[in-house]
Image (spheres, rainbow, N blue to C red):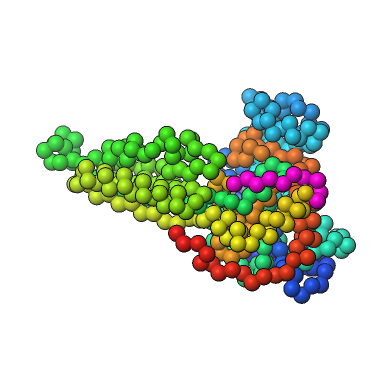
Amino acid sequence: MGAADIQLTRHGHLMASIPATTHKPAGPTVAFLAHVDTAPDCSGKGVKPVVHRHYDGRILKFPDNPRLALEPATSPELLTAKGKDIVTAGGTTLLGADDKAGMAIVMTLAERLLRDRNLKHGLIRVCFTPDEEIGRGVDKLDLAMLGAQAGYTLDGGALGEISWETFSADAAEVTIQGISTHPAEAKAKGMVNAAFLAGKLLAALPREKCAPESTENRQGFIHPMRVDARVEKAVLKFILRDFELAGLAEKRRILKGLCQGLQAAEPRAVIQCRVRKQYRNMAYWLREDMRPVLLARKAFASIGLTPYDLPTRGGTDGSRLTERGLPTPNLFCGGHNAHGLLEWVAVQDMELAVTACAKLAELWTHERYSRPRTKSAVKG
Ligand SMILES: [Zn+2]
């Protein structure tokens, strides 16, 4: 296509430049990012995309899975796509629109900006990353090499969506060391069953108000992801999530408190709870300089879309990037039902994302680059 500075790093990050068409020395460089991996929850191998032209509200069937149906009754967002062309998979795999839709949008944007030199923009960087779905996509991304002052991930959902708030996230691992004996003489030899203690810990969690399945919107949770338990030892893996750092700290306190209670009730066991930081709500940094969000809203509105904020009950690559110094909200790609067989995307919505990003690139030419803020804005 004629892009410049094409680099593939040893960590799998592919970057390229689209040279500026304006020549303002202080103009900011903007990056558009998408991730190449698809969700591990469901197979993304051998995808057979099917294009359903001119959607009219009907029930969509899948060629390779007659029992599967995509319909407005269970996917009401379909009604926003009437008259559009919908892409689904064949019925046995993901479509992988999360995030191939983002890849396609960024590639089409690059093509358009490179072809039409009348479109005004500063230096644009495009970047494709691996491993987003396992939360490590940008850990090793070299921000100096990327060289942008603002970024956007194209990894969002419905038309007009802007995500600039995400969860703050910790992971916790609880290990319970028990005492194993032959069950025949367990009483006499003092068996301490770590598997039983793991069950007690799970039962003590405030599940009715603090689990993923009992919370929504801005509520956080404590989520046991995996339990590996025998008599001698149990290991429990948790994720802790909250939009606010105070709420996240509260969840750490709850889990640690339950472990201490369990320890006090069974002094012969050895119970340890280790918490490690995962990512932080990007809003903590974006609130200091909302331009990346305000310009995205302005770009959307200027092409007739209604921008809306969607706080993400999860993290995006932008959560880590923003914390590391590159403010990076997440923009819509038009995809729905991510991570499952019913995944779909409307072609025309992807097209609108391309147009919105081109407009966004233009709006940034009116801005001046301000020095990046320090990384220590948030503690905890
Ligand atoms: Zn994604």
Total tally of numbered discs in the picture: 0
Instruction: Return the residue nearer the eye: 295 or 154.
Output: 295
* Visible residue check, residue 97: no
Q: Is residue 83 left or right of residue 44?
A: right
Q: Is residue 359 above or below residue 267?
A: below
**Magenta region's main secondary structure?**
loop
Residue in the image at 19% along x and 47% along y: 267
State the image quarter where residue 230 is shown. Answer: top left
Q: Residue 341: where, in percent of width, then height?
A: 62, 35
State the image quarter where residue 8 is shown. Answer: bottom right
State the image quarter where residue 366 is shown. Answer: bottom right
Residue 310 part of the magenta segment? yes
Q: Is residue 2 above or below residue 79?
A: below
Instruction: Return the residue nearer the eye: 374 or 334.
Output: 374
Q: Is residue 266 left or right of residue 365?
A: left
Q: Is residue 334 above or below residue 73?
A: below
Residue 273 part of the magenta segment? no
* Visible residue check, residue 329: yes
Residue in the image at 52% along x and 49% along y: 243
> Quadrant location of the C terminus?
bottom left
Residue in the image at 38% along x and 38% along y: 206
Q: Residue 234: where, in percent of width, then height?
A: 31, 44
Q: Is residue 30 above or below residue 177?
A: below
Q: Residue 161: where, in percent of width, then height?
A: 68, 46
Q: Find the residue positioned furthest to the left.
A: 188
> Quadrant location of the N terminus?
bottom right
What segment is highlighted magenta in the picture? 302-311
Q: Is residue 113 left or right of residue 210?
A: right
Residue in the image at 67% along x and 63% along y: 150
Q: Residue 205: where, in percent of width, then height?
A: 37, 39
